[in-house]
Image (cartoon, coloured by chain):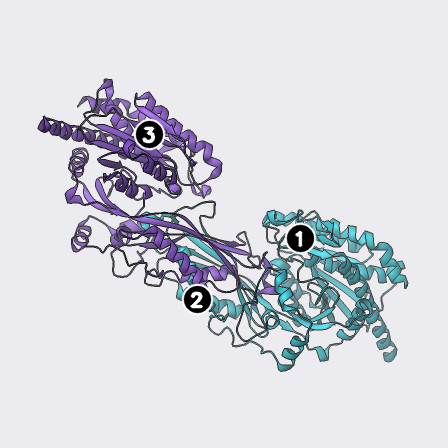
Chain colours: A cyan, B purple
Amino acid sequence: MSPIEEYLQSNARRFQELLFEWLRIPSVSAIPECKGDVHRAGQWLQDYFTSLGLTSELIRTEGHPLVYAETPPVSGAPVVLVYGHYDVQPADPLERWDTPPFEPTERDGNIYARGASDDKGQLLTHVFAAEACMQGGKRLPFQIKFIIEGEEEVGSASLSKYLKENRKKLAANCVLVSDGCMFGPAQPAITYGLRGIVAMEMTLRGPSRDLHSGVFGGAVMNPAVALTRMLAAAIDENGKIRIPDFYKDVLPITESEHTQFSMLPFNEEQFFEKIGVAKSVGEKGFTSLERRWSRPSFDINGLTSGYQGEGSKTVIPSVASAKFTFRLVPNQNPAEIAANAKTFFESIKPEGVSIEIKYEHGAAGMVVDIDESKFIPPAAAALEQTFGRPPVFTREGGSIPIVAELSQVLKAETLLIGWGQDDDNAHSPNEKFSIGAFRDGILASARFWAEVGRSAAVNERLRT
Amino acid sequence: MSPIEEYLQSNARRFQELLFEWLRIPSVSAIPECKGDVHRAGQWLQDYFTSLGLTSELIRTEGHPLVYAETPPVSGAPVVLVYGHYDVQPADPLERWDTPPFEPTERDGNIYARGASDDKGQLLTHVFAAEACMQGGKRLPFQIKFIIEGEEEVGSASLSKYLKENRKKLAANCVLVSDGCMFGPAQPAITYGLRGIVAMEMTLRGPSRDLHSGVFGGAVMNPAVALTRMLAAAIDENGKIRIPDFYKDVLPITESEHTQFSMLPFNEEQFFEKIGVAKSVGEKGFTSLERRWSRPSFDINGLTSGYQGEGSKTVIPSVASAKFTFRLVPNQNPAEIAANAKTFFESIKPEGVSIEIKYEHGAAGMVVDIDESKFIPPAAAALEQTFGRPPVFTREGGSIPIVAELSQVLKAETLLIGWGQDDDNAHSPNEKFSIGAFRDGILASARFWAEVGRSAAVNERLRT
């Protein structure tokens, strides 16, 4: 066993306790009442970086703080920027959690807590791996930078701004992100594509107050009726999105990608059974992997109107609203999609209601050119050493809005290696993260740092 | 001033205090937690009947209790059954009330409280009027019966059952109901028609838990998307309801009714301005009075799905549900409409979600033949004496589900005289009832009792 592996083994319990400590902070970026807790979670990480002897900062922003840290620069050697986020999704509905979301609990080899997988547990693997590589004051033969934000779940506005103003500080050859999934419990994956997103909210207002549906029904446009009609018009029965020009920039799925996806060891029936869905339903003419990874989609995330309590209440609601998201693929432009959606809904709004459409946040999708990558080979080697099999190459349906932007602004390669599983309930009650994946993630990350160091040393020798 | 009028004047303050006392009891029949309060409100009324020296009962049922009371029977004279309800609508959204719903408040000549107009304030007019007519132990020359229920807002199941088993006890020539509106602040009205209702709830279930809309979006049927599509299919852009056979039994609007409605002093612009609606929208080819009174309608009363908090949460909701109602006109059959709606929605349900449809409650609409009525003449006289002008004849868009049933089972004439106003917010925040209407209602009711007594005496004389 190498000194690094020994270090990891003897610190495994401590690492898990540190993760638990961090998970206890309810850093929900979307809920204003949690602002203090989000700050506390950022401070926790910065304190830890400081304890490792790294140069670090808690960067105040107009929103939630950023955490930055770096190992000493090494002239001529590559720079890897680790990106991650310490904010988490809201935990509701609370009553559907088996154990409280912010009281991390070990059960059946998993850690149950909001943020366990998305993304506190995953991002800490790289921190602990770097710690192991630097033990005893060892200098790394390349530089690691960390930029960890607290607004990933609400659109990354502050990092986006900071990035543009601090290109030099964040400059890197590779942006390493662990905020996704393996292809299965024992199958590592390198993700070479992400979907983008456009999140919107539409509110329709009718009468100035809820009305008696008997006295007024039939003579007043009901905002809930208008809302259902308008949303129904956005997507047809074949899963085609009916916003004008929606598909014009969609990067088609190549023949080789289609073949590669179809060769993946994917058990569709089992996959959907796990989420209680009898049958995959979606855009006609595509497989379910293609629908999730390489095709855009439309989802209503929330509906609110009128009486929602027990029994019946015969009102015409004054207000009806919906939260909805589009998932985008390269090369769809989020701002353009949002503008077209707004125009579309405004154009079909019936008489008798007023409309308000908010563009909450958006991000483009991305794809990496596998054949051109300099960091995929060391990553693939580290993964194969750790998991005993080479990684598969996949895309991801989710969005990490800032990732496309980081790689674009920094002109850096993106390397996405997830330690999660599809059933981690990332945005649902009972979010979990496998303890084994946490341990293997740290080990694979340490091996990746070693591989990068080796090739840096080779480069160095070649240069001198 | 007659002794009755003197009595009313000297007791006006006391009557209002009694109403306030009753309004303080939150007798919300739809909310299980209010069961005790509903009972308390029934008990309050029965106690008051007892204090007047009437034979009375608090009748326990499987739901909320019924209150029954009667004056002494008078052989050969008519019997008038007063129907009303002491249960009220839920008060939420609470934050939109200017003063708390169960702390009655006098403001600008109105009483603000849940139930002030619908129906505690209105029904008490007949109780206090009867009290005035019986002052000093005077025997009425006919019999008044009172049947007051606690389930009007949730379908009247217990009274419906009790009625069928107690036809003789409740037997009457006329069912008098005050649970509606005047035609304007100074314009009394006799309502000769009511719409019926079918209230339903539809729940769609997709994945067994909320899913990450990035990881799964596009490959799973989203229950909220399915719900909006299905509801949108129920009513077209011209306001036509698309449930099969929906219109087959609809009683057409007669030429004379059309003319009569068009002659009513109805300021459409003002009417809709008061509820913050710029333009009446509804079924093509009908006036807004016709739409509200004589045509069926469809309204969504509530929508619930997914994330409803602040900001965005990118989930595919596990469940989406809607509460909705149809308003019916004679001779539509509620059970048949409900069954057809269920079949319709089941037939258009997309793959990938399961459906549950509940038929909450239903009632037929009704119309009275004005020319055949024996009680409209004395009622019209009492109204003209009180308000200085004859009543107009109107229909009502709302439903009093039990009224059609009472008149049918008892073979009694129905007499609907509302003391409310269209803007009383009967099912909305800030429900109110005019203090003037409360006072005039008591006076007009007392005069009605006197008119009925006079004609009873005439009948008696003619008979002997």
At label 2, counting other C-alpha atoms closer than 10 Å, the crowd grade (few under 14, some 14-19, many 20 or more) is some
Quick check: do tags 1 and 3 share a chain?
Answer: no
Residue that carries the numbered disc 3 in the rendered image: B68
> How many marks overall?
3
A435 with respect to B443 (left or right): right
Q: Is residue A414 depicted above or below B80 in this figure?
A: below
Quick check: do tags 3 and 2 share a chain?
Answer: no
Q: Nearer the viewer, residue B335 or A462?
A: B335
Q: Amino acid at mark 1?
A: Arg
Image spot of residue A332 (x, y percent): 56, 73
Q: Amino acid at mark 3?
A: Tyr
Q: Quadrant of the C terminus of chain A?
A: bottom right
B39 with respect to B438 (left or right): right
First in sequence: mark 1 vs mark 2 = 1
Residue that carries the numbered disc 1 in the rendered image: A114
Image spot of residue A460 (x, y percent): 86, 76
Q: Are marks 3 and 2 in contact (CB under 8 Å)?
A: no
The chain ID associated with circle 2 is: A
The chain ID associated with circle 3 is: B
Callout 1 secondary element: loop
- How far apart marks 1 and 2 lie (CA) works out to 35 Å
Q: Is residue B82 depicted above or below A133 in this figure?
A: above
Image spot of residue B305 (x, y percent): 51, 54
Residue that carries the numbered disc 2 in the rendered image: A233
At 33% from the left edge and 36% from the top edge, which residue is drawn? Answer: B165
At label 1, counting other C-alpha atoms closer than 10 Å, the crowd grade (few under 14, some 14-19, many 20 or more) is many
